Amino acid sequence: MNAYARMKFYCDEGRCIECNGCSVACDEAHELPVGISRRKVVTVNDGVPGKEFSLSVACMHCTDAPCEQVCPVHCFYIREDGIVLHDKEICIGCGYCLYACPFGAPQFPQDGAFGTKGVMDKCTMCAGGPEETNSAKERELYGQNRLAEGKVPVCAAMCSTKALLVGDEESVSKIYRERVMARGKGVQSAPYGWDIAYGNK
Amino acid sequence: MTNHLGDIQNAKAIIIFGANPAVNHPVGFQHFLKAKERNNAKIIVVDPRFTRTAAKADHYVRIRPGTDIPFMYGMLHLIFKHGWQDENFIKDRVYGMDDVMQEAKKWTPEKVEEVTGVPASQLIQVTRLYASSRPGTLIWAMGLTQHSIGSSNTRMAPILQLALGNMGEEGGGCNILRGHDNVQGATDMCCLSHTLPGYYGLSDGAWKYFAKQWGVDYEWLKGRFKDKKWMNAKGFTLARWYAGVLAGKPGEDNIHNAGTNIKALVVMGNGITSIAQQAKVKEALDNLELIVLADPFVNEAAVLTDKKDNIFLLPAATQFETSGSVTATNRSAQWRSKVVDPLYESKPDQEIMFELAKRLGFYDELTRGMLMGIDEETAQPKQVKKSFKWPEDATDEIARIIKTIGLTGWTAERLKKHQENWHMFDQVSLRGYGPMKGEYYGLPWPCWTETHSGSPVLYDIHRPVKEGGMGFRNRFGLEHDGVNLLAGPHSAPVGSKVDGGYPEITAENIEKVLGITLTPEEKKKIGKNWKVDASGIIAKKCMEAGIAPYGNAKARAKVWNFPDPIPLHREPLHSPRPDLVKKYHTYPDKPNHYRVDTKYASIQDAKDWSKEFPINLVTGRLVNMNGAGAETRSSKYLAKLSPEMYADINPDLAARHGIRDGEMMWVHSPEGAKIKVKAHYTYSVSPDRIFLPMHFAGHFQGEDLSAKYPEGTRPYAVGESANTVTNYGYDIVTQIPETKGGLCRIEKA
């Protein structure tokens, strides 16, 4: 058993309604430049009955994070709880991580169509960066460090339907399991499984 | 709402007409999703476009705009044909269902398909599902109301619920989702032109009751009007105030306003650029002598008009800079605390009104109601203090005066206690626990007395009156055409001294109905009826006897005083189906409709509008925007989600007009107005209609008005207002504009 919890994101496509509460909360909490979207909500098959669904996407804080593996200057570091962070003072803005990322998470400040790219910015799971915890410099470079304050990442806290979950994997899986169990079952009038085991009587 | 958002989790089926809660009520929508997840509830969405709500539904029904009545009659046709109706409920608790049954006979699934565009097989499928999954809740919003037959639509939906016995049940009811912060409270206080607060109307009796309770002389009130006739006359509505300015100009509707036009306009936080007939609104603004706009942001009326002088922008404070009670969509109150003092020179709305009243010389009369109380001896109102405390004394004044909807229990003290203890209430039932046991969160009205629990589910006879139970209100007499209007046997709320129906309680009938004897002292104090009984004796005795003060009657499926006693389908004024217009003709023109002569048949019959304007036009909201959008478009993070005005258009329709995705297009209205917007390809709309979001302003008929904003106030996102091209057309009873189902023409820009 791990000494630390493994932090994960999960977005429930049965619940996500593309309200963008998560992305606006993220923009607002970290006071991001308008061109940067650490979190986005994507709707697939817009307007097609039976096929449309929405998902909120940001850095998933992968195991064996591809970004970390391709970074030529080794600016990434992975916390014991699985959160993938990077050091903006080492990052050279080369964009390799964006090519490696399966979720399109890394963001680069844009200054016009041919403007220079700045250093990479991405979701920190509201865990700040390598600077001193909750220092002004950390906030300036990486936004709020809510985890250090004992708060849930702002996106999930703001999610209007609780589609977006974040936390240690055990808690997230527990909620997910409860939803899957409940889905399509209706209000239970007998202990779970009795109808199968003992019939309706 | 007859029920409340949490209660939707108790539903077995949810049918949604003309509402898009996933977009307009995203937080409330979690209850819909939980009903689906935990209660296996089936969600049916009936809408002209495939919305985000539809994406979460089990069944999506694509309906032609303005044909909800045929669809619901089609459901009733099948319900009655197969005997799925709740016979006992109809017999004991509904008046006039026979007439509905007769009309429903005409609406076979094939005929419904012909008018609504919904395949007969799909109608049968969803009706069977909805009728067999009870309780079922019926949801609606502006998509059902904003039609020339909007008032009939809003009656048709309850009739469907009554037929299935879905009223007064947890998980059932008619649940109308209100769209703005405290809009239910504003309605209950009747910020309207046809009634005094609490829906008391404009009769002499109502004015005299309020004069007494406000501690002002009735004669003085009367003297404020040109003459007494205007005291009892309905005023202009928000939808048609412009006609009050423009009357007399060629082609404009006549008005009945004591021989004068409207000359001044004061707007307090209303985005009047989100009202239909924007071009007329602009012309009216240009012709006013005085415009006062009180708003935390620049009200874009100031940008729209070409008027140069006598326009005043008053900086109003936001909700974070003031406190008091607001009313939620489910009739419950919530106390709100001030977070910061008003910034800079801004003032809360009440202070702006107080200052205005001072200048106009009636500040004392305006505020005296807050100094009044009830004399113990006589049970009459009298002045009990010299100064008032805002907002507590205003809240207590409302509680003291408004009996019609049962606000007696809404004292400031109780509402604050609910706010402080909101963790002590269950989300699904609203029941309090611990110290809050015996009360429902926010004391949903009616909250008959200062110790009443509040009523989370209207018309619920499964719980005693003192715990929120009640039948339907006895409001329209005891009988009509020889039929008893009171509820039948065994349909009184549990724990009632009376078994069946009973009339509304008055001083005259209280002893007989309740089976009690009043003391001489009580007889002296008691008011004439439950609506004006300042003594509180009627409410108190009723609670003891388990009787709802407003009576226990049948719900009216047939409203004999409406233009259509039972709802009838009538095509929109601008219909894409000229073949159906003759058969389902609109109303004759209506003179003096809220002071304006309003056109119906003369527009519908003027020509075949669909020849020149063949495309249906629907408007609606975006999740990141609110109302006319001045506030939300001024937030950079919200604006970036929809930085430009656009039209949702099916690629098939767009391609026929040579319009590519992302290109500009013109939308023309039958009234001759036009807007230039970006085409946004989507399959959510079918090729016979387009959708426009309603939150933009700052462009007008192709012209960018950005330069007209005061320096530094232009929102991040500006664009054409959809309501520049929404059509002429107003509801026959309420005058709400017909923005959901007009016509337009499009072309490549």
Image (spheres, rainbow, N blue to C red):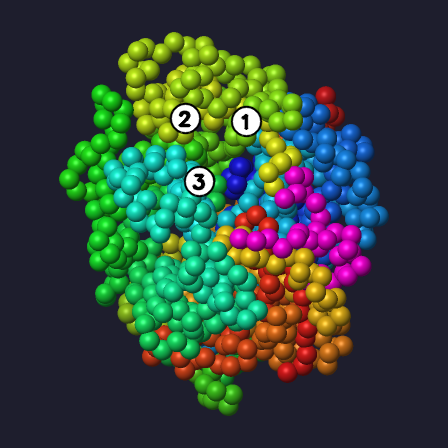
Type of amino acid under label 3: Gly
Q: The C terminus of chain A is located in which quarter?
A: top right
Disc nearer the start of the sequence (3/2):
3
Q: Dots 1 and 3: beta carbons under 8 Å?
A: no
- Reading the image, the residue beneath label 3 is B201
Give the magenta part as a residue range: B563-592
Q: Give the x, y percent position of residue B579.
A: 80, 59
**Which quarter of the figure has residue A131?**
bottom left
Residue that protrudes farthest toward the left in the picture = B386
Judging from the image, what secondary structure is the residue with disc 2 in? Answer: loop
Residue count near mark 1 (Cα–Cα under 10 Å), binned few <14, some 14–19, many ≥20: few
- Reading the image, the residue beneath label 1 is B477
Judging from the image, what secondary structure is the residue with disc 1 in? Answer: loop
Residue placed at 80% from the left, 38% from the top?
Answer: B105
Q: CA distance from mark 1 to mark 2?
A: 15 Å
Number of labels in the image equals 3
Type of amino acid under label 2: Trp
Type of amino acid under label 1: Gly
Q: Give the x, y percent position of residue B101.
A: 75, 34
Have a look at marks 3 and 2 and say if they share a chain. yes
**Magenta residues, dominant SS class:** loop
Residue placed at 45% from the left, 85% from the top?
Answer: A111
- Reading the image, the residue beneath label 2 is B530
Q: Give the x, y percent position of residue B428.
A: 51, 36
Have a look at marks 1 and 3 and say if they share a chain. yes
Residue situated in front as seen by the camera: B594 or B535: B594
Q: Chain of mark 3?
A: B
Asked if the magenta segment contains residue B567, the reply would be yes
Disc nearer the start of the sequence (1/2):
1
Foreground label between 1 and 2: 1
